[in-house]
Amino acid sequence: MTLQISPAAPRVTIQNGKAVTTSLDVADYFDKRHDNVLRAIERLDCSEKFTALNFEVSEYTDSTGRKLPMYTMTKDGFVFLVMGFTGKKAAAFKEAYITDV
């Protein structure tokens, strides 16, 4: 399935043969603070198995040189997360996902 909700969708990379994105890219695309996206991921009510398969804790270095947490997530993890978001971009994603299935 290919979701195209706008030309400026979150950045996706290929890692170990899987399409993934990061919590930073999700925060940027949906105009959310990164700490709020981290909290949303940590509060997801999914199984430990689903979490282990679809979310990986990582870190990035910010502009001041600090190492901070972030998550790398699969398409399934991304969809699970975004289905809990609100706002115009989240609604557009949900509509595109539903009509493309």
Image (cartoon, rainbow, N blue to C red):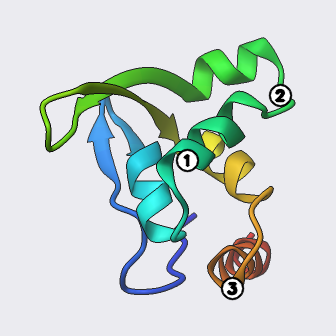
Work out which quarter of the rendered image holds the N terminus and state it.
bottom right
Which residue type carries mark 3? Lys
Q: Which of 26 and 66 is in front in this view?
A: 66
**Quadrant of res 85:** bottom right
Nearest to the eye among marks 3 and 2: give it.
3
Nearest to the eye among marks 1 and 2: give it.
2
Number of numbered discs on residues: 3
Instruction: State the SS at label 3.
Output: helix
Q: Tell me which label, 1 or 2, sits earlier in the chain.
A: 2
Mark 2 burial class by Cα count in 10 Å: few <14, some 14-19, many 20+: few
Q: Do the residues labelled 1 and 2 touch (CB within 8 Å)?
A: no
> x, y (%) of residue 91?
74, 79
Residue drawn at (47%, 44%) of the image: 23
Give the residue number, with chain letter if any, for mark 2.
46
Which residue type carries mark 1? Lys
Instruction: Establish if 76 lies above or below 3.
Output: above
Give the residue number, with chain letter if any, for mark 1.
75
Q: Which mark is residue 88?
A: 3
Nearest to the eye among marks 3 and 1: give it.
3
> x, y (%) of residue 32?
55, 63
Which residue type carries mark 2? Cys
Instruction: State the SS at label 2.
Output: loop
Would residue 20 be found to the left or right of residue 4 on screen? left
User: Residue pushed farthest front?
Assistant: 64
Q: Which of 25 and 16 is in front in this view?
A: 25
Instruction: State the SS at label 1.
Output: helix
> Does residue 22 show up?
no
Spatial distance from mark 3 to mark 1, Cα to Cα? 20 Å
Spatial distance from mark 1 to mark 2, Cα to Cα? 15 Å
Mark 1 burial class by Cα count in 10 Å: few <14, some 14-19, many 20+: some
Q: Tell me which label, 3 or 1, sits earlier in the chain.
A: 1
Q: Tell me which label, 3 or 2, sits earlier in the chain.
A: 2
